[in-house]
Amino acid sequence: MKVVAGLSLLSLARKGLQNRQHPRFAELGVLLAVSSLVIATTTSLPAFFLGLLAHEIAFNLLSARLQARVSDMAPTFAGQWLVATMLLGAAVGPAVHGAALAMDADAAFMLFAMVSALLPIGLLAARKAQA
């Protein structure tokens, strides 16, 4: 799966779709949210595979573009806290997911995951309001 996602990202980069001026946070956030929903709800193996592929691509692109945008907006914060924030998310995420499953709150967790995929859109809106 990682190889297919990597090759897809490489082809996107070669086509020039990695536009720094228009990072496409909205499109990638929606793709990530929808692919998360497909992965969680599908009973079809091809749909699961395509959802997982879309999830990998959207997550990697959104993550890289969001990190670049945070580094551009606040270099001091990015230098000190970006890695710590990512590590905290990686450490806490599985525990929160496990707790949600234990409390039979898988739908609430999916909703949380889908909403958090759309948070970069709010970041851009807040940044434009400040400018």
Image: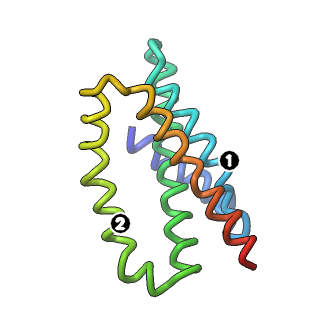
Sort mark 2 into few (<14), some (14-19) or many (20+) by Cα contacts within 10 Å: few
User: Where in the figure is residue 90, as x and y percent of width and height?
Assistant: 30, 54
Q: Quadrant of the N terminus?
A: top left
Q: Nearer the viewer, residue 45 or 27?
A: 27
Residue 91, horizontal then vertical, whole percent = 25, 54
Write the residue at 60% across / 40% down. 31
Which marked residue is nearer to the observer: mark 1 or mark 2?
2
Q: Which residue is mark 1?
A: 27
Q: Residues within 10 Å of mark 1 (few under 14, many from 20)?
A: some
Q: Is residue 2 above or below residue 100?
A: below
Quarter where residue 40 is shown: top left
Report the residue that reaches farthest toward the top: 43
Q: Amino acid at mark 1?
A: Glu
Circle number at residue 85: 2
Q: Is residue 121 left or right of 41 when viewed as pictured?
A: right
x, y percentage for residue 16? 69, 61
Q: Considering the numbered disc 1 on the image, is that residue within a helix, a strand or a loop? A: helix
Task: Report, in whole angstroms, how far the alpha carbon at label 1 lies from the one at label 2.
Answer: 24 Å
In depth, the one of 85 and 23 nearer the eye is 85
Residue 54 lies left or right of residue 105; in this view the side is: right
Q: Residue at x 36, y 82 (%)?
A: 80
Callout 2, which amino acid?
Thr
**Secondary structure of the residue carrying numbered label 2:** helix
Q: Residue at x 74, y 71 (%)?
A: 128
> Residue 26, percent across and down?
68, 51
The residue at the point 53 percent across, 82 percent down is 74
